[in-house]
Image: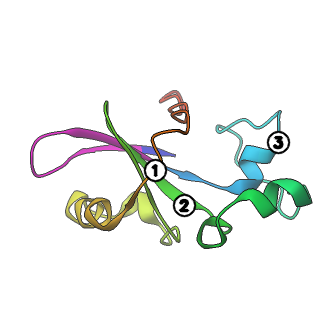
Amino acid sequence: MKRQFFDANGVSWDVWDVSPQDLSRVDYDRRATARTQGDVPRAFSASVYPELREGWLCFQSALEKRRFAPIPPEWHELPDGVLRVMLEVATPAPAAEPMLPRPTTNE
């Protein structure tokens, strides 16, 4: 699920949940409701930072990407004000990493 909101400066941000299990599956489809658990290859799971192994929220604007972990329950129902606070404390993603593709809004 993807949400869009504006920060205090009027910058548009997309936010969605990311799971290491999702990234390890070549045939992953964000629109699918079922996700396979426990199928992360050992080499892949070892390459994920320990604080991100349970998943994270990806915040992405036109110029920046940040991560917030762990994923709060029912995060997609939180008010925009709460997302703004989470964005402020989120960790900037390393610039060397390619930007994650934004999920489509056709869900």
Q: Is residue 29 left or right of residue 37?
A: left
Residue positioned 48% across, 71% down in the render: 72
Report the amino acid beneath label 1.
Answer: Ala
- For label 1, the SS is loop
Which residue corresponds to mark 2? 56
Residue 88 seen in the current view: yes
The magenta segment is 3-15
Q: In which quarter of the image is the C terminus?
A: top right
Foreground of the two, 90 or 18:
90
Cα gap from disc 3 to disc 2, whole angstroms: 17 Å
- Residue 1 locus on image (x, y percent): 52, 46
- Residue 86 locus on image (x, y percent): 32, 65
Mark 3–mark 1 CB contact (< 8 Å): no
Q: Which of marks 3 and 2 is nearer the N terminus?
A: 3
Q: Which of marks 3 and 1 is in front?
A: 1
Q: Quadrant of residue 63?
A: top left
Foreground of the two, 45 or 32:
45
- For label 3, the SS is loop
Which residue corresponds to mark 1? 93
Residue positioned 24% across, 57% down in the render: 80
Residue positioned 53% across, 33% down in the render: 103
- Residue 49 locus on image (x, y percent): 64, 65
**Which label number is shown at residue 25?**
3
Q: In which quarter of the image is residue 11?
A: top left
Report the amino acid beneath label 3.
Answer: Arg
Cα gap from disc 2 to disc 1, whole angstroms: 12 Å
- For label 2, the SS is strand
State yes or no: residue 6 in magenta: yes
Report the amino acid beneath label 2.
Answer: Trp
